[in-house]
């Protein structure tokens, strides 16, 4: 070892640590960001966001339906829990549909596309038959199915357009036909316009807007050229302008955007009292069940304007929580659509995400006074079994698609216990003398490290 001028051995200095590593460890915000980014990029992130977000929205919606509908039920000489019990029954049936849809293979979803479309068209035609169709709030879009239960077939038309449109575009993509604008538009656009016509016969402009959003979402995912996309959009806007201009009721709703006063003949009564409910909620609300506006001041408090009651009772914190859940659900749907190689999964996941996101934006925008009141419920949250059932089935579609991702499938297989044939297969692949599969837990590792005589 060479010596220094003084005859002493040179001092061995420790190597310097990288500055980036030290700054990452010393910065708690950066460390948190790295951890969140890693958790966000895991294979099962979309799966858990869809499952957890939809269940939280549904449960919170049941609570708010019970709170917002009590006064309305008592005014109709019904039990206070009348609307809650119907919504809870619909949620249970919808939960079964979601479970079934999440376990169905993709090919079975594609096989159901045409039967669901045919059934939806048949029911929407029955709505216009005198004696079968039922008018609610001026719109004839309902069918009585016995007792207090009614069915709105147009809600199932959304699901039908998503499944059938996704299957159609996927088959045409496999045959390399989407490069031709005729194959991209026909028969997707004519069938969508047929559904829109059947819906508009009953006067339901809100559902027609959602169906139009699904159509444009499918065309966007299919890679429609800008001129083609703009042409279809211009036709839809022209028809929408004509329908709004020729209806005094729709023109009155359009005039209530941003209104702060009920106006002549109280035409903006609902919009203004929705703002009053949100404004009186404050940061944390007046308390669950303590809403004032639901005592007859706010129409449709448990359906279209349930978000206003949520803001009044749970405050800004409650409304932002609901919006965050919808944002997480929308992100997860986009992630599923963007990471798959199956064209049907991409179109169907994109269509469902467009459906739920557009409907949530239209409902919340109407409550906030930023959009005209379209009469559409908040998905998974508002009262209405006809809207809840197809929406939960669509959520089951997203869960099934998230499970079909190869990385997510491998991650789920690692977390599931192996019994029966799977366990025998693992034992057979490891050899005849291989023992049972041990889980990688601290308890297993500790017991394996001990000798046989230790206690």
Image (cartoon, rainbow, N blue to C red):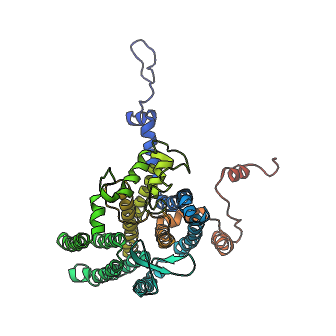
- Residue at 25% in and 83% down: 183
The residue lying toward the viewer, choosing from 448 and 8, is 448
Identify the image quadrant of residue 352: bottom left
Q: What percent of the width, then of the height, locates residue 275?
A: 38, 50
On screen, residue 294 versus residue 253, left or right, reads: right
| Residue nearer the viewer, 418 or 100 | 100
In the rendered structure, the answer to whether residue 90 lies left or right of residue 434 reads: left
Does residue 187 lie above or below 275 as drawn?
A: below
Q: Is residue 243 above or below residue 453?
A: below
| Residue 193 seen in the current view | yes
Residue displayed at 65% across by 53% down = 441
Figure quadrant of residue 417 = bottom right
Q: Nearer the viewer, residue 122 or 454?
A: 122
What x and y, as percent, mark residue 237?
22, 70
The foreground one among 180 and 125 is 125
Q: Is residue 180 visible?
A: no
Residue at image coords 42%, 37%: 24
Quadrant of the snapshot with the N terminus = top left
């Amino acid at each position: 070892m060479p010596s220094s001028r003084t005859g002493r051995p040179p001092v061995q200095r420790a190597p310097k640590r990288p500055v980036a590593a030290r700054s990452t460890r010393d910065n708690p915000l950066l460390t948190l960001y790295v951890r969140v980014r890693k958790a966000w990029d895991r294979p099962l992130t979309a799966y858990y966001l869809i499952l957890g977000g939809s269940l939280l929205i549904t449960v919170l919606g049941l609570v708010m339906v019970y709170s917002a509908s009590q006064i309305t039920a008592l005014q109709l000489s019904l039990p206070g829990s009348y609307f809650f019990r119907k919504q809870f029954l619909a949620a249970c049936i919808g939960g079964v549909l979601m479970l079934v849809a999440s376990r169905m293979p993709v090919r079975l979803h594609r096989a159901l596309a045409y039967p669901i479309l045919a059934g939806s068209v048949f029911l929407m035609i029955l709505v216009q038959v005198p004696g079968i169709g039922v008018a609610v709030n001026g719109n004839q879009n309902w069918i009585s199915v016995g007792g207090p239960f009614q069915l709105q077939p147009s809600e199932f038309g959304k699901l039908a357009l998503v499944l059938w449109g996704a299957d159609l575009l996927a088959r045409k993509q496999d045959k390399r036909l989407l490069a031709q604008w005729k194959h991209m538009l026909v028969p997707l656009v004519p069938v969508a316009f047929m559904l829109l016509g059947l819906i508009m016969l009953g006067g339901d402009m809100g559902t027609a807007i959602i169906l139009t959003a699904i159509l444009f979402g499918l065309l966007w995912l299919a890679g429609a050229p800008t001129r083609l996309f703009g042409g279809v959009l211009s036709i839809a806007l022209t028809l929408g302008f004509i329908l709004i201009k020729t209806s005094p009721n729709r023109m009155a709703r359009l005039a209530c955007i941003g209104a702060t006063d009920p106006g002549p003949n109280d035409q903006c009564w609902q919009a203004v009292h929705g703002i009053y409910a949100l404004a009186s909620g404050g940061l944390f609300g007046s308390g669950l069940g303590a809403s004032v506006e639901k005592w007859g001041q706010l129409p449709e408090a448990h359906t279209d304007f349930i978000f206003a009651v949520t803001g009044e009772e749970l405050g800004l914190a409650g409304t932002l929580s609901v919006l965050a859940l919808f944002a997480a659900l929308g992100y997860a749907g986009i992630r599923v659509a963007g990471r798959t190689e199956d064209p049907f999964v991409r179109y169907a996941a994109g269509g469902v995400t467009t459906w739920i996101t557009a409907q949530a934006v239209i409902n919340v925008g109407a409550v906030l006074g930023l959009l005209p009141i379209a009469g559409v419920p908040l998905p998974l949250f508002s009262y209405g079994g006809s809207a809840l059932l197809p929406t939960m089935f669509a959520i089951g579609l997203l869960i099934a698609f998230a499970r079909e991702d190869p990385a997510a499938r491998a991650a789920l297989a690692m977390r599931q216990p192996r019994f029966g044939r799977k366990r025998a297969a693992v034992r057979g692949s490891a050899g005849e003398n291989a023992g049972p599969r041990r889980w990688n837990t601290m308890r297993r590792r500790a017991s394996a490290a001990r000798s046989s005589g230790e206690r």
